[in-house]
Image (cartoon, rainbow, N blue to C red):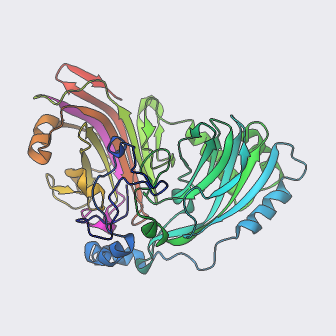
């Protein structure tokens, strides 16, 4: 998911997929990660178009959701409070503090060395704007990333999603930090946007990194026994408990961390709850050729929708859905809309994703909220009729939940998912 505007390439646009961290052409296959190989305008130009795309309903939400001014604690002040809390606790190896501003290029800030297997917990404050004129901002945990740079390469990027998080080093090396709003092209954290676009952002992240001796959870429990800092220690302990409930066999899309949106519920269901965040959960499929008769079946119950206005507008685009990804990089996502008619088909209004994602309204309105419903789609027919590309296989099933734009609350549960030919389906859930 990227919040940058897409358009026909112009002279001031660097081709998508070019890595600004190297003067050479990028060798990474960005397509395999679900990114878009298309030209994009600078994000600052995208802001100009936002009010035209959003409409009055979304702007009304924005007007009443401006964050409190000067509510952000400085990194130094947070670090001082953590240091007092950690006095006499051997589990704390060191405490680092940091500030990320728009001027900081990715991975230019380091927080010392980590040994393989060592854990570090992050505690974040601040906010990041994606449309300041319309009062739309992101939590610091959504934009904050970390990785470990070792002698033989870099780890995959780690995104907290929530305003606390813990990283376990998969190698020895330097702990590096960065920020991104959908601007990374790969799991290693290279940019796909031009440097000038990246530097045009607005916002600030204040943070503390607590590096541990031994298990992070034990250290957090020791800190919690002494007190807390703005409820952050308790929040991280709670996040750790939620993380253990990740549904087996599923993984998060690389650009987003685990926001605690999807959890394994009793009976094997997948519960979904989103509030001012976004998540894409992916399940890799066994060989599923795109042939006549290929079906997607699922059973779900949707209790609450994160939008009350049409979701085909950019700043209203909060929704719950199940999707399939094809081997040509396209995906079709079947959503429950608050007000769009059943059967409506539209390309994703998010610039960048409009090149690969098509939405189909499967259900609409509120009359069936709370009702368990069985669904079926003929994927061969849908792909030919809606996309019409050159795909030969379905490669992943996705679950999508988004409430970033209007910061409302959505809740649903998936109780069965299967894909394949009739009588020979792969059971995903």
Q: Is residue 364 left or right of residue 46?
A: left
Looking at the picture, how far across and down is residue 391, in whole percent? 18, 37
Q: Is residue 86 above or below residue 171?
A: below
Tell me the quarter of the image containing the C terminus: top left
Instruction: Answer above or below: position of 136 versus 382.
Output: below
Specify the quadrant that holds the N terminus: bottom left
Residue 76 appears left or right of 87: left
Q: Is residue 304 magenta?
A: yes
Q: Nearer the viewer, residue 117 or 314?
A: 117
Q: Residue at x 20, y 52 (%)?
A: 361
Q: Is residue 247 above or below residue 228?
A: above
Q: Residue at x 42, y 63 (%)?
A: 408
- The answer to whether residue 367 is visible is no
Q: Position of residue 352 (x, y in %)?
A: 30, 58
Q: Which residues are magenta?
A: 294-317
Q: Nearer the viewer, residue 51 or 116?
A: 116
Farthest residue, direction front: 24
> Residue at horizontal 29%, vertical 76%?
49
Residue 197 visible, this angle: yes
> Which residue is at the front of the view, 271 or 352?
352
Residue 236 shown in magenta: no
Q: Residue at x 58, y 66 (%)?
A: 104
Is residue 378 rendered to the left or right of residue 82?
A: left
Numbered circles on residues, count: 0
Residue 100: image location, x then y, percent? 61, 65
């Amino acid at each position: 998911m990227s919040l940058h505007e897409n358009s026909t390439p112009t002279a001031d646009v660097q081709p998508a997929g070019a890595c600004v961290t190297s003067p050479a052409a990028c060798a990474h296959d960005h397509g395999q990660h679900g990114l878009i190989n298309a030209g994009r305008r600078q994000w600052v130009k995208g802001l100009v178009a936002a009010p035209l795309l959003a409409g009055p309903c979304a702007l009304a939400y924005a007007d009443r959701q401006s964050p409190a001014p000067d509510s952000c604690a400085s990194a130094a002040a947070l670090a001082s409070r953590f240091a007092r809390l950690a006095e006499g606790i051997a589990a704390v190896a060191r405490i680092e503090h940091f500030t990320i501003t728009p001027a900081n290029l990715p991975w230019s800030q380091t927080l010392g060395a980590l040994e393989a297997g060592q854990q570090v917990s992050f505690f974040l404050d601040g906010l990041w704007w994606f449309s300041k004129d319309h009062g739309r901002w992101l939590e610091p945990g959504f934009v904050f990333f970390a990785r470990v740079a070792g002698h033989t390469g870099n780890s995959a990027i780690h995104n907290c999603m929530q305003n606390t998080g813990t990283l376990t080093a998969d190698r020895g090396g330097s702990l590096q930090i960065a920020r991104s709003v959908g601007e990374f092209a790969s799991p290693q954290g290279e940019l796909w946007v031009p440097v000038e676009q990246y530097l045009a952002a607005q916002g600030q992240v204040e943070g503390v990194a607590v590096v541990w001796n031994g298990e992070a959870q034990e250290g957090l429990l020791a800190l919690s026994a002494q007190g807390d800092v703005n409820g952050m220690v308790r929040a991280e302990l709670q996040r750790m408990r939620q993380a253990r409930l990740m549904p087996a066999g599923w993984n998060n899309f690389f650009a987003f961390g685990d926001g605690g949106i999807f959890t394994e519920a009793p009976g094997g269901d997948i519960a979904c709850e989103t509030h001012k965040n976004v998540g894409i959960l992916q399940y890799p499929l066994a060989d599923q050729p795109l042939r006549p008769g290929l079906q997607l079946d699922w059973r779900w119950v949707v209790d609450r929708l994160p939008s009350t206005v049409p979701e085909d507008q950019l700043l209203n685009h909060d929704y719950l859905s199940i999707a399939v990804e094809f081997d040509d990089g396209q995906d079709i996502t079947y959503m429950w809309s608050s007000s769009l008619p059943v059967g409506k088909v539209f390309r994703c209004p998010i610039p960048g994703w409009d090149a690969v994602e098509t939405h189909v309204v499967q259900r609409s309105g509120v009359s069936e909220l709370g009702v368990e419903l069985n669904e079926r789609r003929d994927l061969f027919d849908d792909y030919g009729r809606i996309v019409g590309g050159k795909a030969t296989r379905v490669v992943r099933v996705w679950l999508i939940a988004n409430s970033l734009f209007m910061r409302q609350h959505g809740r649903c549960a998936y109780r069965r998912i299967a894909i394949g030919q009739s009588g020979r389906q792969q059971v995903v859930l």
